[in-house]
Image (cartoon, coloured by chain):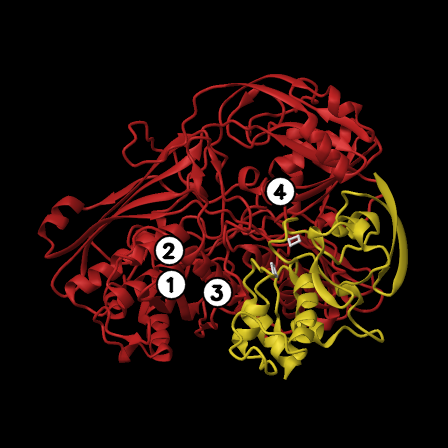
């Protein structure tokens, strides 16, 4: 049990402190930072998916007025570490995926850099490539573990026997597409060396993790690298680890001593160089008895990784803890392909995994004639099914009930195709959401009494749109027992105390716990009336109860979907999410976070799919014209609310993290609603109109 | 080939030499240091780089700077008056109509331009009566703001913020 903060500023809804700067465009993102006389970097990419660079002729490029340097695999400075193959840019002549960086041009202007890039003559000896993902491949392998350190496979009881005995079963394969994170701000880095010290203005979800990675790869003492990132134009996981833009910009800046070098990836390059969500193929087997009680839950996942660096999405993980069933198993298998390196995208594992599981649950509920809300309530486990641990709090049922009440679920005729409004078939669907409460060790924070009698709180945390500038200051205010206006928060710079990444919805949990510890120690040492200049730094306390409880956030999402009878066009007309996410720090901002996640879930359900041309190994729809993300007119009124949940076991704030849960389950709720509307079960995202034209 | 252009940017007269290939967006950002204009795609597909050009909303990545000698450009930074942000900007803050804020300067410029278009009675794809005055329903606002993508998904709050000003 943690010593919970008494909420005073927590739970209030101050507007974003950086709001005025953002609406006037004066908030400085990585590419906006003022640097003197920068040079511009343009990347040259491989146009084959596999091969070997045999020659790079930069003569024509170098002859162009304004070109300062051309980096190639032959002349690029050697890196200290090439362990991370994704970051080992220009360190070998191998081409491992289409779009890989094979040369880079530094020039006086962006126009010249781009023109010169086209003049660099890269010859590649092409080799046969393999980019086909299929569950029938004979070279699928089991990774040692999956993302977030989860077990690759788990098994309890006897699924096959339970499936054979169960009167109602579902055994289907569901697929999710290749998704690109596409934060609105492209990955941007400005690098400047001076006297062997490196300053990076970078769009990152964590200044310290980026610094540590850059220092290791470049062979520098971390103290000699400074990363600055006060505002970040979204990340959704793709800025959670350093990508090649950081390293190549640092290398390029080395080639032009004294000149800062700027790189902003193009939208197209972001489809090859900054990670993406792997497509998944999920076989889900569920069996239940006559009353709708689950007997078996089994999920077998096939997904891709790149041949040069393993990333194993933990897609089956949510099925391990969602519902009670005596017989259960999960597996993850990977195909290592000549594709760009996949990585984190908002709710890795939970997001694709819950599309399949929650679709299958809907199918089974219908098969056994139990209402889908009731089916989920019925299969509520008393303890976490696989681990046997008690939940620190679990309010899925409350979310389902409250959501059903507000949505008007009970008025629903369960028969598919039962509602038609002019030319539209209308249906409703439900799905559960879940996301673990993650806490990352390693942060520190400093509290200082300032000249003006306020409190400066420093920690190298990130605000990627999550609201950290505001919500972490609220945490600090309550931890110090002062008003919100008395806190001056500083984040986004490695000159501040070390902070962990904004990932896994762990920000407020990790940084907040650290700030609370620092504030409490500050008060213990300096009392109620500290002197100007009194200062204290503390690290995040060890987690006492972390192993005793299973800690997860939950939610229920309800969707109303309209499918046009002639064209098959699918529109979402209502979306409601009810969440149990512990204490909400700032309702105004929290609502935005949850609605934003649900909106991205809607986008996943209806629009998004990176289309791989297997002949050439690249995503052909690599821009916003063809990789459609939900636009304003695609999004109805999306409502997110939460139930009052008090969890004394998670952290001193009682928070569970809200950045990712909103996208979990949305696509299933929408697919389930589309089935209710039309009787057509779509198991392959996205729900494009062709599925409904038969 | 280079050429000189003179621009009025947010009320200040600025002169700069540009490459004939330089977009208005890059001229503003890299040439003049006007970073209130954002680049999300460079292809006219996201709206992040929207400004008011002679009062009309334009995506600056799709037009060359050299073609705009003498033009008046208003970015999000210059929308306000008398030391106060524009009412649309205030409504955006109040309604939390953004998260990361990267699309936001473009959204607010687009919103201001859109409100003027609607006032002028210019119809959109969802306007039923093409001749009468435009009634700004939520659907009208959604339609007219769909050139400005927001990956953070702030659309609902954007509509509310705009309606606060429109009404
Ligand atoms: S940057 Fe101009 S529309 Fe995207
Ligand atoms: S606020 Fe982040 S993209 Fe719109």
Left or right placement of residue A558 versus residue A28 in this view: left
Q: Which residue is mark 2?
A: A688
Q: How many angstroms separate mark 3 from mark 2 (CA)?
A: 14 Å
- Of the four image quadrants, the one with ligand 2 is bottom right
**Which quarter of the figure has residue A211?**
top right
The quadrant of the rendering that contains the N terminus of chain B is top right
**Residue A304 in which image quadrant:** top left
Counting residues from the start of the chain, the first of labels 2 and 1 encountered is 1
**Residue B111 in the image: x percent, y percent?**
66, 70
Q: Nearer the viewer, residue A382 or A142?
A: A142
Q: Earlier in the sequence, mark 1 or mark 4?
A: 4
Q: Are marks 1 and 4 on the same chain?
A: yes
How many angstroms separate mark 1 from mark 4 (CA)?
41 Å
The correct choice, above or below, for A287 with respect to A159 in the image is below
Residue A294 percent across, percent down from the top left? 19, 58
Mark 1 and mark 2 in contact (Cβ < 8 Å)? yes
- Identify residue for label 3: A634
Label 4 CB, ligand 2: below 8 Å? no
Which secondary structure, mark 4? helix
Residue that label 1 marks: A570
Q: Which numbered disc flags the more N-terminal residue, 3 or 1? A: 1
User: What residue sits right under mark 4 in the picture?
Assistant: A209
């Amino acid at each position: 049990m943690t010593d919970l903060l008494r909420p005073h500023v927590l739970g209030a809804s101050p507007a974003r402190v950086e709001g005025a700067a953002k609406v006037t465009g004066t908030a400085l993102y990585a590419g906006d930072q003022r640097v003197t006389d920068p040079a511009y970097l343009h990347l040259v990419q491989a146009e084959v998916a596999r091969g070997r660079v045999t020659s790079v002729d930069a003569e024509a490029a170098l002859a162009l007025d304004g070109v300062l340097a051309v980096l190639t695999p032959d002349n690029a400075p050697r890196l200290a570490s090439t362990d991370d193959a994704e970051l080992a840019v220009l360190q070998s002549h191998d081409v491992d995926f289409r779009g890989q960086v094979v040369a880079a041009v530094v020039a006086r202007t962006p126009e010249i850099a781009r023109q010169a890039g086209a003049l660099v003559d890269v010859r590649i000896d092409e080799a046969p490539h393999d980019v086909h993902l299929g569950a029938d491949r004979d070279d699928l392998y089991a990774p040692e573990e999956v993302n977030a350190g989860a077990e690759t496979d788990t098994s309890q009881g006897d699924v096959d026997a339970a499936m054979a005995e169960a009167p109602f079963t579902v055994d289907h394969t569901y697929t999710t597409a290749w998704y690109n994170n596409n934060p609105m701000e492209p990955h941007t880095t400005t690098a400047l060396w001076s006297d062997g010290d490196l300053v990076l203005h970078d769009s990152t979800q964590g200044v310290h993790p980026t610094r540590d990675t850059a220092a290791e790869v470049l062979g520098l003492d971390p103290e000699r690298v400074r990363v600055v990132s006060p505002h970040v134009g979204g990340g959704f996981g793709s800025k959670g680890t350093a990508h090649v833009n950081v390293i190549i910009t640092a290398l390029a800046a080395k080639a032009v001593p004294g000149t800062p070098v700027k790189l902003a990836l193009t939208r197209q390059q972001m489809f090859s160089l900054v990670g993406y969500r792997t497509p998944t193929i999920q076989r889900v087997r569920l069996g239940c008895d006559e009353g709708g009680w689950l007997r078996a839950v089994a999920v077998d996942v096939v997904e891709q990784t790149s041949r040069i660096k393993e990333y194993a999405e933990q897609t089956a993980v949510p099925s391990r803890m969602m519902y009670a069933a005596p017989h259960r198993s999960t597996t993850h298998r990977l195909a290592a392909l000549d594709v760009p390196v996949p990585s984190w995208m908002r709710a890795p594992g939970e997001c694709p995994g819950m599309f399949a599981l929650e679709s299958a649950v809907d199918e089974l509920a219908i098969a056994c004639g139990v209402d889908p809300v009731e089916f989920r309530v019925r299969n509520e486990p008393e303890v976490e099914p696989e681990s046997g641990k008690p939940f620190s709090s679990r309010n899925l049922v409350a979310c389902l009930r409250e959501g059903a009440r507000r949505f008007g679920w009970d008025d629903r005729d369960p028969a598919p195709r039962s509602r038609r409004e002019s030319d539209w078939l209308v249906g409703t669907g439900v799905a559960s959401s879940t996301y673990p409460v993650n806490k990352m060790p390693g942060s520190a924070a400093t509290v200082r009494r300032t000249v003006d009698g306020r409190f400066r709180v420093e920690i190298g945390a990130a605000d990627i749109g999550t609201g950290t500038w505001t919500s972490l200051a609220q945490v600090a205010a309550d931890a110090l027992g002062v008003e919100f206006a008395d806190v001056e928060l500083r984040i986004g710079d490695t000159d501040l105390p070390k902070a962990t990444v904004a990932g896994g919805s762990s920000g407020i949990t990790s940084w907040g716990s650290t700030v609370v510890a620092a504030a409490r120690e500050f008060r213990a040492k300096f009392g109620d009336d500290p002197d100007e200049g009194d200062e204290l730094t503390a690290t995040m306390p060890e987690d006492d109860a972390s192993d005793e409880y299973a800690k997860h956030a939950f939610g229920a999402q309800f969707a109303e979907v309209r499918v046009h009878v002639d064209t098959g066009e699918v529109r979402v007309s209502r979306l409601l999410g009810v969440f149990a996410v512990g204490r909400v720090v700032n309702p105004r901002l929290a609502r935005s976070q949850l609605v934003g996640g649900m909106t991205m879930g809607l986008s996943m359900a209806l629009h998004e799919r990176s289309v791989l041309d297997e002949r050439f190994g690249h995503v052909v729809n690599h821009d916003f014209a063809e990789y459609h993300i939900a636009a304003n007119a695609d999004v109805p009124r999306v409502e997110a609310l939460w139930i009052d949940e008090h969890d004394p076991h998670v952290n001193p704030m009682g928070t569970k993290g809200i950045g990712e849960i909103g996208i979990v389950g949305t696509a299933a709720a929408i697919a389930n609603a589309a089935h209710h509307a039309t009787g057509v079960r779509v198991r392959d995202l996205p729900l494009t109109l062709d599925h409904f034209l038969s | 080939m280079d050429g000189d252009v003179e621009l009025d940017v947010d009320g200040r007269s600025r002169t700069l030499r540009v490459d004939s290939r330089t977009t208005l967006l890059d001229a503003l950002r890299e040439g003049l240091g006007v970073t209130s204009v954002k680049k999300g795609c460079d292809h006219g597909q996201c709206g992040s780089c929207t400004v008011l050009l002679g009062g009309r909303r334009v995506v600056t990545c799709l037009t060359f700077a050299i073609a705009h000698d003498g033009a008046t450009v208003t970015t999000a930074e210059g929308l306000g008056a008398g030391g106060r942000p524009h009412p649309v900007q205030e409504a955006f803050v109040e309604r939390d109509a953004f998260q990361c804020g990267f699309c936001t300067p473009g959204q607010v410029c687009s919103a201001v331009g859109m409100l003027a278009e609607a006032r002028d009675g210019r119809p959109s794809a969802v306007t039923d009566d093409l001749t009468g005055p435009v009634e700004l329903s939520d659907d009208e606002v959604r339609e007219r703001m769909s050139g400005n993508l927001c990956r953070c998904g702030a659309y609902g709050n954007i509509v509310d913020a705009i309606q606060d000003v429109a009404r």
